Image: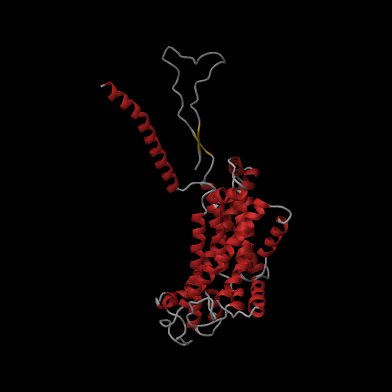
Amino acid sequence: MTTLDLPPVAASGPVGEPAASGPAGPAAAPQPEKKLRIGGVTRDDVFTVAGAAVGSLALNWVLYERVLPFSGAFGFLICWYLFFLAGYYLVGRLQWHPMMVRDRLVAVAAWSSGLLVVALIADQIGYVASRGWEAAQHLNFFTESMDHTGPLDALTSGGALNAVVGSLEQLGLATLFAVPLGIAAAVFMSEVGGRMARPVRTLVEAMTALPSIVAGLFILGVVILTFGFEKSGFAASLALTVMMMPIVTRAAEVVIRLVPGTLREASYALGGSQWRTVWNVVLPTARPGLVTAVVLGMARGVGETSPVLLTSGFTSQYNGNPFSEHQVSLPLYIWNYVKQPYDAMIARGFAAGLTLMAVVLILFVTARVLGGRRPGQLTRAQKRMISREARRQEAAALGGIARPYAIHSQAKH
């Protein structure tokens, strides 16, 4: 809650005259400071939201269930939300100024939209966790593959080790291919420019909206059918590279453009070339944002199913070599097992989905932690290192000043 401190109000009198003091003593003491509340949530706000929600729910139930020929939970929730906004506006007009009502209506709509998104995400995570926890609670799910497990075997047998390893290897190769290409394209568009910058930017934007199945068909037609490579984890990583590279390029270009131009000018003034400025000034300054771009691209690629389905093949055996034979990944593992008519297989598929969600969550949290700083902002470790270096130089300077005085004193004695 934000408060505003007002200065004490002195006793007022005619202009140009001091405060009157009677024979009884000096003027009255100043009044205590008053705090004006200019933010936060009041009790009226809570009661208004609660009343609008309850009233709109009752009205929506009467109209939706008793009067109008409608049915379905989704339509009920949509109508309830619309009635809630209308009711909140009408109740607010009874007690606030119209401008304040509009401001609070927008605030309520923003808050409710955010809560709705959080609720949907929590519902998805809860549903997948409830369906997959039965298989994920067994340690063998993360230490065994499905090569010796049948569809009717218990959940204490078999697991998704082959899929986890396959996803990590394919994602690692795709990152190795996509990151240098994406950052190089971003540097070209933001630092070099020229007539080719616009076509490259248009192509990158078009690739961002490219359907994932098209990337899989491209690698299938060019790499597998034309050049004769077999379906493997390497082919799947190439398909993921096609999906990850535009994400990395666009995010990296935005981050590089945020680097202050004064840093480039200072480098040029010291005699640095363009490529030396990019390598030693621009890229180190934008390092946190570039890390965020890379992690976001990885989070996009780890969950792709269509490119992997056409390029990696499927196998229930463990294969740690991505350059030879078929190799399964977590999305392909989920797609294959969740559609089978066996409860144990469906549970394993949902457990793999829970594992994939955990991997994506780890990647996004990593991006948030590593990319939370602005371009050029120092970390705590860097600040401590600079402080230690400054103290060391100060001590050395003081020692250099004190030495002549010590020599002069010894010469006098």
Kindly indicate the quadrant of the structure image that contains residue 388: top left
Kindly indicate the quadrant of the structure image that contains residue 301: bottom right
Image spot of residue 102 (x, y percent): 64, 47
Is 325 displayed left or right of 395 in the figure?
right
Is residue 36 visible to the viewer in this orientation of the structure? yes
Image point 67% across, 72% down: which residue?
A: 214
Image point 49% across, 59% down: which residue?
A: 366
Question: Is 270 situated above or below 68?
Answer: above
Report the coloring of the rendering.
Answer: secondary structure
103, 42: nearer the viewer = 103
Image point 35% across, 27% down: which residue?
A: 404
134, 242: nearer the viewer = 242
251, 27: nearer the viewer = 251
Residue that protrudes farthest toward the left in the picture: 413
Is 171 displayed left or right of 226 in the figure?
left
Is residue 91 visible to the viewer in this orientation of the structure? no
Residue that protrudes farthest toward the right in the picture: 195
242, 389: nearer the viewer = 389
Image point 28% across, 21% down: which residue?
A: 412
Image spot of residue 155 (x, y percent): 43, 81
Image spot of residue 133 (x, y percent): 45, 74
Residue that protrudes farthest toward the top in the picture: 23
Count of all numbered marks drawn on residues in the image: 0
Image spot of residue 350 (x, y percent): 50, 75
Looking at the figure, which quarter contains the C terminus?
top left
